[in-house]
Image (spheres, helix red, strand yellow):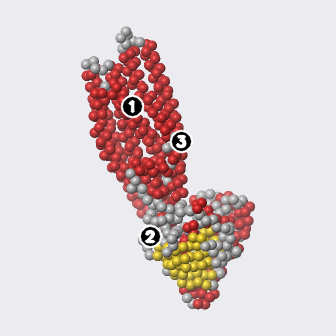
Amino acid sequence: MSRFQPLVAHEGISSGAELSTWATLRRGAAISPELTRGLAVTLGLAVLSTLGRVLVPFVVQRTTDEGILAPGGPDAGRVVGWVAVALVGVAVTAVSAYAVNLRLFTASENGLATLRLKAFRHIHDLSLLTQSSERRGSLVSRVTSDVDTISAFVQFGGLMLVVSLGQIALATGLMLYYSPLLAGVVWLCYVPLFLLIRRFQGAVGAAYTRVRQRVGEMLGAISEAVVGAATIRAYGIEERTAARIDAAVEAHRRAAVSAQVRAVVAFAAGQFVSGITTAVVLVVGTVLAVRGQLSLGAVLAFLFLVNLFTMPVQQATEILNELQNAVAGWRRVIGIIDTPADVADPGSRGVALPRGPIEVVFEGVTFAYPGGPPVVHEVDLRVAPGSRVAVVGETGSGKSTFAKLLTRLMDPGSGRVLVDGVDLRQVSFSSLRSRVVLVPQEGFLFDATLLDNLLFGCPDAGEADVLLALSELGLDEWVEGLPLGLRTEVGQRGESLSAGERQLVAVARAYLADPDLLVLDEATSAVDPATEVRLQRALDSLSRGRTSVAIAHRLSTAEAADEVVVVDGGRVVERGPHRELVAAGGVYAALHASWAAQQRS
């Protein structure tokens, strides 16, 4: 048993649901430190803008009692003076609010960009098995729509919640200054609401968590239908597909309505209490004014203060609902980042391999997909440097798994895969990807020009290098026949090209990468016989002096190899040169005879 083991047994991507609201906020701030950078200054400016709002009731009281109702008659000078103070306060509030919003938007966009990048990059540290535990559309939603919910809260709700709490505190202080009795009345009206909101937040949070899950499921169903449009039409299953999408959309609608109903209940309760509070304060304040216990200016100021108190309470109620929605999205993004990277890049601690022909050794390698039996059983195998090896076997025998383990798209459950004597898990990705190149069964192309797609193999190459490579591969005439040559747009996933043409691009891309170990996972299976011959000649030239491992579907590849490795039921059952294995009359001889018969028919 190797001392290098996978960190997890492919348990899938974490939902983050185990995190509390406060733990989610702390973890989110730790992942995106830009969110809290300069926060003290931003809060200070927010407090300053709040003080400007609270200044208005104070000015109203002074203007009324000392200016309009002055003992000797209206005092225009005092009125003008206090109005000037109010104008200065409003100006300071406006400037402070502008600075707060500017700083907040800048910090939030920087922080959320970091969050997206960390989540996206971590996805690439997860094995194919872990990624496939969740639909692609749902996975994409975690770094798009889920982050958007966080953005909506951070850019507005987060600061407004703090400002609202500060405004409530300042309004309470001034209310106590004017009339402790009326301040007590206000708080007695609101205490039941605060208790209700606190109890209600758990239900709101759970409802918004379901909403974020349904969004992911809906996007997954839609993206699957878009990508598989050709298959859907070919089999005439449009109605069945539409029904699946309708079900996903309906599930999202029900979850969203349920969450909004809970949110509206809390908001409506806040408005109801606000109206009741204003009415009670007006009655009690009038009584106190009639008794001479409060001046008219103080009553007016107090009504302004009640408004300043009730508005942030209502805002805080709504913002707390937004907070639950944001936290639900934040948990899903954090769930990606906190999912252990079972195929992690050792980075700067990793080994950088020198250039040259690679020796490959499998030592007791065993691998099983989640919930299934082993598909590779204790494989011991050595591939000599510079040799050309073909791996053959029936469908489902473990050939493609062999290729994924060799290129470290997955790690073995036990045993080791060594390159030049170093465990693959110790090799830095930068070194591994520059020395080992996989050409998969289906060549994936990006929505760009043919030239751009080819340059992914070697970003430093120029157009002249690309043309030379295509000429050596015998593909120059094919490229010249395209509408715009190298400038031809290949479309999404290369859909403007045929399957065989996409594979030609993938092989040419690998040719430009100039690897020391070339892994071909049935790379010629999608090309016509004439192209296969031309392609095989180019690959023969490329593999000369290098190590190459071909997962062979067409046994013409095996015939040209230095050695053939026969896999059956996840075990290596035969190995040797093509002629010897045919003469031995074993598993390979039967495979070759069957393939040869198909070629003659």
Q: Residue at x 45, y 61 (%)?
A: 13
Front residue of 540/596: it is: 540
Q: Is residue 511 left or right of residue 341?
A: right
Disc 1 and disc 2: Cα gap in Å? 58 Å
The residue type indicated by label 2 comes to: Pro
Q: Which residue is mark 2?
A: 370
Q: Which residue is mark 1?
A: 170
Q: Nearer the viewer, mark 3 or mark 1?
A: 1
Q: Earlier in the sequence, mark 2 or mark 3?
A: 3
Q: Residue at x 28, y 32 (%)?
A: 276
Q: Position of residue 271 (x, y in %)?
A: 33, 36
Q: Position of residue 406 (x, y in %)?
A: 57, 72
* Residue contact at pointers 3 and 1, CB within 8 angstroms: no
Q: Position of residue 327 (x, y in %)?
A: 42, 49
Disc 2 and disc 3: Cα gap in Å? 43 Å
Disc 3 and disc 1: Cα gap in Å? 28 Å
Which class describes the residues within 10 Å of circle 3: few (<14), some (14-19), or many (20+)? some
Q: Earlier in the sequence, mark 3 or mark 1?
A: 3
Q: Which residue is mark 3?
A: 106
Inspect this view and state whether residue 248 appears: yes
Q: Which mark is residue 582?
A: none
Q: Label 2, secondary structure: give it.
A: loop
